[in-house]
Amino acid sequence: MRFRTVFRAPQSKSRPPLLYQPRASCSFSKIHSSAKRPSFGIAFDIDGVILRGRVPIGGSPQALRRLYGEAGTLKVPFLFLTNGGGIPESRRAIELGELLGVQILPSQVVQGHTPFKNLLNKYENELIVAAGKGEPALVMSEYGFKKVLSLDEYASYFKDIDPVSQYKIWTKEYQNDHLIESAPRYNVLYDRVKAAFVVSDPVDWGRDIQVLCDILTSGGLPGGDNGHQPPLYFAADDLEYQAAFPSERLGMGAFRIALESVFNKIRHNTLEYVSFGKPNPFVFKNAEAMLRQLQPSNHNVHLLYNGDSGSPPFKTLYMIGDNPFVDVKGAQQAGHPWFSILTRTGVFKGKDNHSEFPADLVVDKVEDAVDYILERECASS
């Protein structure tokens, strides 16, 4: 039997962490023997917990397979709760399923920009721009927004808006391959942008900061007179995240800081914006609601797709993440029934618990976290 060191968050600074020694693996039949539905659910961060780049880490494929029955049906409700994004949830689900070897439903993928769909009633027929890597305009279109342009396409309709574009080979290639229309799809040269959405990490920070400042300082029409700032929404606000490179990479929060600093200097007032994503407590409440829809029943597998508004509340929801400032802080702010588990495979690499945002549990990798959860729930069932 392997022994792993798992630290519980101490109740006081003088109390030492506890040593966890895994027991024999608990069977799903025992977990489900006393109730029709499991009383717990799991939210996994992706980058630094499940994947590093596109490579599974921490025994994630094996860990996730333990949450399915022999026939491949979901036995424990879980979802991916990530600040990442840039592609539709449906495509991300397919991608994760292929990398991890399990079936993932689109409803099991909650990305930083997923809450944007709640703004559909306000901007459905208004001209909006979507910034970021991937396909930000497609993301917003699939949410139902009718007049959305990527910042790449929007900027291409304004001659000389990017004064250094001639030095950017990739920009020229994009324009040649994708922007073959001679006229804008919408009346962008005259219609004001009603809102700007940063859907994912931008690729061309300099160009995007310039164009967003043009939009935000002009009241929605670059080159025009100063006007009231259109609303600005960020899908997330994490400063750093763990990608394939050994050390952390700058995230959307870093881009927000850069944009805000420039805007405040040239406009002489404060940039107004709204950030979604973890650690926003709203994101965790939304994840709880989605997990309830995924809560399986021994008598009705269709609940995996149709949900059940009459589901009993969860006793425990486990947030497994690698970033204390995002995953642990968010779970703590959300409160009961969230239980935070911190892995050492991403942003956090400390030997002991994090000092400012200590998790309820610290483990080496995600497989250890799932082992602990199943043994804990087995013991309480």
Image (cartoon, rainbow, N blue to C red):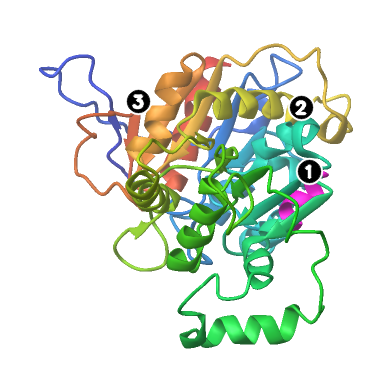
Q: Name the residue under label 1.
A: 126
Which residue type does callout 3 highlight? Asp
The magenta segment is 138-144
Q: Mark 3 points at which residue?
A: 360
Q: Is residue 105 among what the camera can see?
A: no
Point out the image quarter for the C terminus.
top right
Q: How many residues crowd around disc 3 within 10 Å: few (fewer than 14), some, or many (20 or more)?
A: many
Q: In this view, does 78 lie to the left or right of 185?
A: left
Note whether 110 is above or below 32 in the view shown. Answer: below
Compare residues 238 and 304 and report the one nearer the observer: 238
Q: Name the residue under label 2.
A: 293
Name the quadrant containing residue 58: bottom left
Sooner in the amino-acid sequence: mark 2 or mark 1: 1
Q: How many residues crowd around disc 2 within 10 Å: few (fewer than 14), some, or many (20 or more)?
A: many
Q: Is residue 313 left or right of residue 25?
A: right
Sooner in the amino-acid sequence: mark 3 or mark 1: 1
* Secondary element at tag 2: helix
Horizontal and vertical percent for residue 253? 40, 47
Q: In the current view of this chain or complex, which residue is farthest to the left?
A: 14
Name the quadrant containing residue 350: top left
Name the quadrant containing residue 244: bottom left
Q: Disc 2 to disc 1, how far (Cα)?
A: 31 Å
Sooner in the amino-acid sequence: mark 3 or mark 2: 2
Q: Is residue 325 among what the camera can see?
A: yes
Disc number at residue 259? none
Which residue type does callout 2 highlight? Gln
* Secondary element at tag 3: loop
